[in-house]
Image: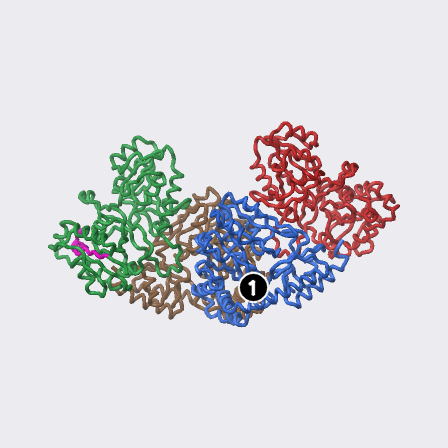
Chain colours: A red, B green, C blue, D brown
Amino acid sequence: MIKVGLIVNPISGMGGSVGLKGTDGDAYKKAIELGAKPVVPRRVKDTLSLIKRKDIYFLVAKKQMGEDYVREFSFKYEVVGEIKEKTTAEDTKKIAKELISKEINLLVFAGGDGTARDIYDAIGTSVPVVAIPSGVKMFSSVFALSPYAAAKMIDSYPCEITDKEVLDIDEDAFRNNKLAAKLYGYLKVPKIESLLQQGKESSNLTVAERKRKREIAKYVAERMEKDTLYLLGPGTTLKSVADELKIEKTLLGIDAVYKGKMVGKDINEKELLNLLKKHKKAKIIVTPIGGNGFIFGRGSKQFTPQVLELVGEKNIIVVATQEKVSSLECLRVDTGDMKVDERLKGHIRVITGYKEEMIIEVK
Amino acid sequence: MIKVGLIVNPISGMGGSVGLKGTDGDAYKKAIELGAKPVVPRRVKDTLSLIKRKDIYFLVAKKQMGEDYVREFSFKYEVVGEIKEKTTAEDTKKIAKELISKEINLLVFAGGDGTARDIYDAIGTSVPVVAIPSGVKMFSSVFALSPYAAAKMIDSYPCEITDKEVLDIDEDAFRNNKLAAKLYGYLKVPKIESLLQQGKESSNLTVAERKRKREIAKYVAERMEKDTLYLLGPGTTLKSVADELKIEKTLLGIDAVYKGKMVGKDINEKELLNLLKKHKKAKIIVTPIGGNGFIFGRGSKQFTPQVLELVGEKNIIVVATQEKVSSLECLRVDTGDMKVDERLKGHIRVITGYKEEMIIEVK
Amino acid sequence: MIRLHMNENPYPPSENVLRAIKDSINNINRYSELKYADKLKEALASYNNASEKRIILSPGSEFLLRELINIFSGNRKLIMTNPTFFPALKHAIRNARKIIKHQLSPPNFELNREMILEELYEPTLIIVDNPNNPTGKMLLDRKFVMEILKNKDILLLVDEAYYEFVKYTFADLVDSYPNLGIVRTMDKSFSLAGLRIGYLIAGDFFLKEIYDFPRFLPIPTLFAAREALKNPEYMEENIRKILIERKRLESGLKKIGVTVFSGEVNFLLIKCDIPELSTILMDRGIMIKDLSTDWIEGFYRVSVGLPEENDKFLAEMEKITNNPALKW
Amino acid sequence: MIRLHMNENPYPPSENVLRAIKDSINNINRYSELKYADKLKEALASYNNASEKRIILSPGSEFLLRELINIFSGNRKLIMTNPTFFPALKHAIRNARKIIKHQLSPPNFELNREMILEELYEPTLIIVDNPNNPTGKMLLDRKFVMEILKNKDILLLVDEAYYEFVKYTFADLVDSYPNLGIVRTMDKSFSLAGLRIGYLIAGDFFLKEIYDFPRFLPIPTLFAAREALKNPEYMEENIRKILIERKRLESGLKKIGVTVFSGEVNFLLIKCDIPELSTILMDRGIMIKDLSTDWIEGFYRVSVGLPEENDKFLAEMEKITNNPALKW
């Protein structure tokens, strides 16, 4: 028997049909006013209907936050926690924490980027999640691609686990009328391989992935020059590089390294510009964030057009696992400055392992 | 049509049956007095009878030095040169030179170590030879192993060619009642591979052999220590080592090298002992000489028991091609001093290529 | 199960070939005689207008690719594309000293030739399949290949597994360029996948290093391959049928709304937003190749099958694309 | 030609095996299904009392040996014997980073175990065939093998190509020692040389690096091997006959005055002073293995053939040894 938590954000996705960017906070009211209908019940039910295993014990939130859907199926379940009539982000977080305290094996949630952020805030990477996409914004790569895929993740548990990104709209940028996503953190997601992949290749892909990141880190570290300032972007791959350098990395921010020492932690644009004034030679190391392969413009707004111009496009090092980069049609940039974007376009070299590189187009 | 020279030493091998060590010089008379019968005609005829090719034009010495045997077969031939009734080494040399001047492709000769030496003195490595063994002493590895093999060499020409050693009794040692062979030089010999070797492995084994020797040389050179005196024994493999060091090697003698410079050319025991007094650390590099795998006691008498004791058995480096050493049942030593021989026995490491070694027993 | 996942030829080999296999078992306790391999090499030499001595046989071309990667990437940089024949790429990633992969991106899947030429400042082995699997695109042309080959420090290995479908080859350059090798297979075009017969047409440099490749192949394989080469018209007729079916399959898929990338071979590259499409099809008795694990999500490779197999595949695809439960 | 040069089994496989080959051609245009290989692995696992997942199949064990040498000798020293299975040794000499060969010398052909243990101060791959080909001697015993294996930096690969003739194996140690691999073949004992079927019983360390070895073997090979394993008694009866013949061959040769080194397998190592013996025999319709090119002059390996083949060989050997023209 496995214990599976279920949390549904009942209002997620409602803004989409009425032209809103999301239903976070007060936007929900506006969505209702505009006549939006909930999309989430159908998706949760699709998923539940495709689950094949019988040994599941569900722990679900009350009413429209879980109970209402699971009730229609033959699963054993119990209801956990209390909710208000109008559910908020706080409900999601509170119930998620309660579920964790009941030692669930897996947390299924339905929602969008905002819900994913709430789940991340509440439980971090303590248990793997299955994310049923039903938001308006879904920049995050945590979401399952289909009811079929979500059900299969549940059926396959316990299985290989991988880190997936939680992105959401950068609210500061949004207020300035710019739509830019920011990396908020990582959730753990079951990794299902296509059934047609004949024969498993590795008994534990998570370990392999970690090993691959270490290889990348080792190669990058070996090639670092002494008289150069290195600006490490956000993400777990960059964290591996920092680990190799024995430096404590800010997972979601930018750190600066010079001669193997940290010279700036979680720095903003102004601090970056100051550092760049002090150092003649500087290089940026970044990894693509999100499923569309953005290396600038998602998750690292501190790398502004001005910073990028100072560093120069020849001094940008991209790192990513073979698995991640080979799944991308191309890399993308969206710095907010067309001229800078244009200069970054063309083919670029990505470090994908120890002495292993990939040439890929930047669009 | 190929032009094949034929020289027979008609008195070779006669000493064997009457307990003589050879028929060189005056020993022949003694052999006759003792009632020795010539063995050579039978062997030459055996060889000629097994030749299958028809496109041979023989150039032969007169009478019992060639003409007498070839006459019995259907080969085209012409007679070259003059001989005295009692043939001497000088006849052999003179006729060999005449044959070379007539641009033969191959020289067939019958005799023993003494004859091989004469041929070597006269023609060096200008044309390949097929040596029909009929001497008493046959330390040299130039000789064909059977009439079948000799005929096949002739049938196979043009084919791969390899360097084979000409050894003979060391006359200085012999006068002191010691039987020791000395390396006199090299002759070129057709290399026939067993027909059962399915599929040729290399289009030109001679080149491969030279390449292998260069590899050995490179490996030895790379591992040479700066503060050590190196004593290079005789042979083509050691010549390759010297070539690698850009030093002109004495092919048949011992040279001394220190810090990459030649510090003694073709040196004798006394000079060796003097050098060893001057240098704290010294190593000997030798290669097995002759078919029985002697590393000391054949071809390098300057490495006396006293020299070997001073250098120490741990400081002996043996080099040889894979081909040569793998054909040996074991390596052998015969320094003349039982105690020194005993210390050299056991298993030893032979360098056979670049980062390629063989462990073989020394007996 | 309908097998549209391995680019097999859906037609069996000729009756003569089947008989040759049956006739091969008389001395099956003995290793194949070298003359069997020699005769096959002779036939391949004549089929390819190449020199017999340049042909190295292998029980499937994968063994050749692995061996060449093993031998030549130890002291050379390796350049490959992604995607390509994946077993070779994976082996290369794990074993090559240094590897540069070129991502082929939609919609044109072109090789960035300038970036390749820029890379050739050190000894390098380039392995490219032409046409490429799974995009079906020709990545190389004669001018570019000759540009590469004039640099003697560069080795170029072209995997022409799908040669018979395009009839475009660089095999005629092997005599002039010691640094060129052509990998081929009879598995697909000659309907011999179950017997595994690959071969290398080796330039002198490759030949020198791989002359000792194992020579005692399975006898049924040698007999069948030789028999098949006696009648290449049979193979060509099958290819003609496959190419006609490919067109039908392509337009059928487009009608359903599936994105099809036109290739020139016996398979199609398609893009389909339905996640886990290959799993869904497998549940319905059809196998296709899911490219998402090794390459881009949503891309699949579909081999051209028998007409009735293609019909069934199209029918299932239509049902699937019309099923909303399979999409979000 | 009487083939006594490749250690083949002179007896054909059973009628059932021959039928299995004929039955294998129905879908020969398709790659073998993975379940065919899985079923063979299952049968081999049960035959060897090993775990199924440890078994890697290969179209002849030579491909496995080459691959393992390629993969593991890049950053490891390699130790092999001379003589051994020569194709593997030659491949190793040309491709290993560093190689130490141990010359096996007459009359005992023993391995110097102390020198091997002394060598193990750095990561090393040791490949030994046990019993050794061509001496027929057992070179390893359990105590020595375990002494080697306790050092986890050392990989030991034992080629047990002649296992069925001696019934002595280290396969049972593979579960306990990740650094042990056992190479086997069904070519000889099971009379399948014309189909080529080798396999590795892999310790965890080997398994991790070779799990992706090509899996689509020729279908006739897979079918025949599996069928042969259903009735190992047939194979054992053939081996019994071969071992009886070996004794007869040995005493026959000794009577003629040929030096015979007693081995425990389906061949004899002999020493004979007649140069070019193998060529002379070939002119008389008999092939034996001349060891002089790769090892010591005058040594030959003779496989045990059918009784009438052995008779013919003995008769020719008697004539040859009595012919003075063949010796000097």
- Residue at image position (36%, 40%) is B244
| Secondary structure found at label 1 | loop
- Residue at image position (40%, 56%) is B201
Q: Please, is residue D32 above or below residue A339 in the view?
A: below
Nearest to the observer: residue D28 or residue C183: C183
Name the chief secondary structure element in magenta.
loop
Question: Image check: B339 left or right of D136?
Answer: left
- Residue at image position (20%, 56%) is B8
Nearest to the observer: residue C94 or residue B20: C94
From which residue to which does the magenta span run? B5-22
Q: Residue furthest front?
A: C143
Q: Does the magenta stretch include residue D45?
A: no
Pinpoint residue C170: horizontal percent, then vertical percent: 51, 56
Question: Image check: A283 left or right of B295?
Answer: right
Residue under label 1? C189
Pinpoint residue C137: horizontal percent, then vertical percent: 60, 55
